[in-house]
Image (spheres, rainbow, N blue to C red):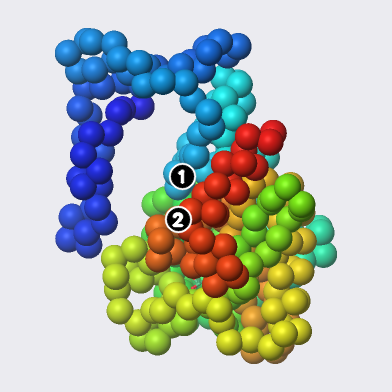
Amino acid sequence: MLEADDPAKFALDAAHLPEVVDNGSRVLWPEPGGTRTLRVVQADGALADLGPIDVVLPILHGTHGEDGTIQGYFDTLEVPYAGGGVLDSAVCMDKHFMKVVLESAGIAVSPWVTIRRAAWTRDAAPLRAQIEALGLPVFVKPARAGSSVGVSKVDALDELDAALEIAFAEDEKVLVERGISGREIEVAILESADGVRASLPGEIVLTERGFYDFEGKYLGGDGVDVVCPAELSDSQIAAIQDVGIRAFEAVDGRGLARVDMFLADTGGLVVNELNTMPGFTPISMFPKCWVASGLSYGDLISELIEAGLRR
Ligand SMILES: Nc1ncnc2c1ncn2[C@@H]1O[C@H](COP(=O)(O)OP(=O)(O)O)[C@@H](O)[C@H]1O
Ligand SMILES: [Mg+2]
């Protein structure tokens, strides 16, 4: 792990995605049971003290960041941290296990088929039959990726193999899911001293984009609006908040999560996924939903830190 220098180097720019370049520094994490002092060895070999750690805010996406591994590392170091723990982070990083857990808790998820690359290569025919039974369109996605990387919408069966290849490039385990036609609703969950609360729900409004893809999420791509609060009736809001909290509890959620679901055209709520470390820029849905619910960005960060310290 490096000590970051100039934060401006990490700005999100569609033409130039930021890259972490090794500046030669190395962060030294504290030994368990000690003073929790964080130190850094700088490029020239000098050792600097960065002071004691009170609590870590691991605002990290993807492998090793939100999949429970860094959370386990902090547990081992006896360093308190905010947000999800080992189990909820690991379960929610793997879309297959996330759906298994939600389904067994009685929460509706989109019907799906999980495919291992080896099984697909060995004998695709029975898997193809299961996929065809889902109906069209289907969404093809890597089990463990995120940020819509490797996700494709398949409208015709002759597009299936290409979509699977795109997903297999990210993970050897891939999900094919029935496409749900409806509104894309997200609710922010926070664990505070007096229990688990749900925010007002927000909505991903797609105007000119087929689905909420990487470009629409991060690169300022047109055709998508992140709206909170979403236009919903009181009973819809209550049902969404109830599903959000139940989904959070089903995965043994800790600290926070964003629960993404579809309000299907047929009326029901279908949970798409939980994110144990949702996007956290001031324009991201998670903080936006809390601001709409009366909690400022600063107070939100304070609540997360306090929840981390309480453990
Ligand atoms: N079953 C589905 N039905 C309809 N749209 C879907 C479905 N699965 C995914 N999508 C669309 O694709 C986007 C990305 O898929 P998602 O499962 O959320 O992956 P990620 O973890 O990369 O965000 C969703 O935000 C949604 O727009
Ligand atoms: Mg998503």
Of the 4 image quadrants, the one containing the C terminus is top right
Where residue 149 appears, as percent x and y from the top left, is 40, 59
Where residue 151 appears, as percent x and y from the top left, is 44, 64
Tell me if I can see residue 266 in this picture: yes
**Residues tagged 1 and 2 counted as in contact (Cβ below 8 A):** yes
| Residue closest to the eye, 20 or 54 | 54
Q: Under tag 1, what secondary structure?
A: loop
Of the 4 image quadrants, the one containing the N terminus is top left
Determine which of the numbered discs, if any, sits on residue 47 in the image: none
Determine which of the numbered discs, if any, sits on residue 59 in the image: 1
What residue does disc 2 label? 280
Report whether 276 appears left or right of 13: right
Q: Residue at x 41, y 61 (%)?
A: 282
Task: Give the tally of numbered discs.
Answer: 2
| Residue closest to the eye, 307 or 168 | 307
Tell me if I can see residue 247 in this picture: no
Disc 2 residue type (three-letter): Phe
